[in-house]
Image (cartoon, rainbow, N blue to C red):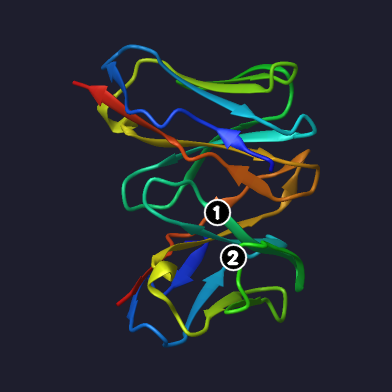
């Protein structure tokens, strides 16, 4: 399967702990995006990369959140000192410009529960 | 604040009928538009994209774009129970930029 993969699929952690999620994009895709989704809401943009460069980071993303894509392939999203409000589905997507636009394809997501 | 607006629903449509899902966007500079389907507990799945005014058809799905009215729609013909899901509309705010999602419309196809 050459789709977007994410690991882990589920994470339960206690408040105050650090967590790290990994995303492996579709191999030929140069763009990688992170989103957060809570129940009843659409995906909320967090940050995105073109190759290894982080192009934009949402103002909603506190300094407890950091993302990297060191070699322009997989990416990690770290949340430090987790809070209960961080409980959500964290989605990764990748894209590559085809014709006129970027089409984003999503991974299965990582569901985070902070207790 | 650049926004994409959708009616949250639920929208109930009899099996075999046409389901019509609508979306408006605030940024007149938006270039490209996407429709995603999301089943409960799953990640969004791309159905269609459109970037030119008019209609774009793919099987039972037709996307419609009216840039003057800042309006995007998705029609699903011959609706099936398997079409029951949340449909997310998304807009690319500027060329080469990120996309912004609406909150989604829940569609329920009645057998």
Q: CA distance from mark 2 to mark 1?
A: 19 Å
Which residue ends up furthest to the left in the rendered image?
A: B111
Q: Crowding at label 2, few (<14), some or many (≥20) Cα neighbours within 10 Å?
A: many
User: At 33% from the left edge and 84% from the top edge, which residue is drawn?
Assistant: A14
Q: Position of residue A106 (x, y in %)?
A: 52, 54
Badge 2 or badge 1: first in the primary sequence? 2
Asked if residue A28 can be seen in this view, the reply is: no
State if disc 1 and disc 2 touch (CB < 8 Å).
Answer: no
User: In which chain is the residue bearing label 2?
Assistant: A
User: At 60% from the left edge and 72% from the top edge, which residue is drawn?
Assistant: A62
Q: Quadrant of residue B52?
A: top right
Residue to which mark 1 is pinned: A44
Which quadrant does the C terminus of chain A fall into?
A: bottom left
Please, is residue A92 above or below residue B37 in the view? below
Residue to which mark 2 is pinned: A25
| A4 to the left or right of B107 | right
Nearer to us in this view, B106 or B48: B106
């Amino acid at each position: 399967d050459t789709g977007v993969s994410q690991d882990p699929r589920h994470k339960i952690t206690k408040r105050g702990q650090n967590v790290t999620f990994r995303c492996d994009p579709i191999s030929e895709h140069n763009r990688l995006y992170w989103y957060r989704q809570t129940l009843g809401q659409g995906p909320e943009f967090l940050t995105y990369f073109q190759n290894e460069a982080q192009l934009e980071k949402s103002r909603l993303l506190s300094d407890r959140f950091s993302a990297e894509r060191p070699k322009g392939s997989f990416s990690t999203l770290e949340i430090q000192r987790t809070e209960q409000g961080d409980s959500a589905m964290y989605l990764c997507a990748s894209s590559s410009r085809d014709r006129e636009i970027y089409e984003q394809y999503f991974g299965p997501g990582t569901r985070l529960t902070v207790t | 604040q650049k926004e994409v607006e959708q009616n949250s629903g639920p929208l109930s449509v009899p099996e075999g009928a046409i389901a019509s899902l609508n979306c408006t966007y605030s940024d007149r500079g938006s270039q490209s538009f996407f429709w995603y389907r999301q089943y409960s507990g799953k990640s969004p799945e791309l159905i269609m994209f459109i970037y030119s005014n008019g209609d774009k058809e793919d099987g039972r799905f037709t996307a419609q774009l009216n840039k003057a009215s800042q309006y995007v729609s998705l029609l699903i013909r011959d609706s099936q129970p398997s079409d029951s899901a949340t449909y997310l509309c998304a807009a690319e705010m500027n060329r080469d930029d990120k996309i912004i999602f609406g909150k989604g419309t829940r569609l329920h196809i009645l057998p």
